[in-house]
Amino acid sequence: MTEALFFTMIEYKSYTGINKPMDALAERLDAKLREWEPDTAATVRERISEIINLADQDALDIVRSRAVEQEVLDTLDEPISQ
């Protein structure tokens, strides 16, 4: 177990009072944040923080996902049939 993962698990326990391993997604994110360039990792941390804040406010449903935006762009790019 890496040091960063170990400390993250300790923080999880102290924050929640629950002694259970991190979610697989959190583990993957932890590994990637250590792997990426510092600027990339900082940007990801910022965006994830924004998503957490939106989720806390129950406001995620008003934010368009990239998948929806891509669907709209694909539709606009389709040739017009006559």
Image: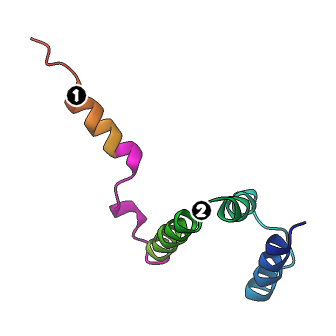
**Image height check: is 7 above or below 32?**
below
Q: Is residue 64 magenta?
A: yes
**Image height check: is 40 above or below 73?**
below
The residue that disc 2 covers is 37
Point out the stretch of residues depicted in magenta. 56-68
At horizontal 47% and vertical 77% (from top left) the residue drawn is 53
User: Which mark is on residue 77?
Assistant: 1
Residue 46 in percent (x, y) is at 49, 72
- Frontmost residue, 37 versus 67: 37
Residue 12's image quarter? bottom right
In the rendered view, does 49 fall on the left or right side of 68? Answer: right
Residue 32 in percent (x, y) is at 68, 58
Q: Amino acid at mark 2?
A: Glu
At horizontal 13% and vertical 19% (from top left) the residue drawn is 80
In the rendered view, does 73 fall on the left or right side of 8? Answer: left
Image quarter of the N terminus: bottom right
What element does badge 2 sit on? loop
Q: Is residue 19 magenta?
A: no
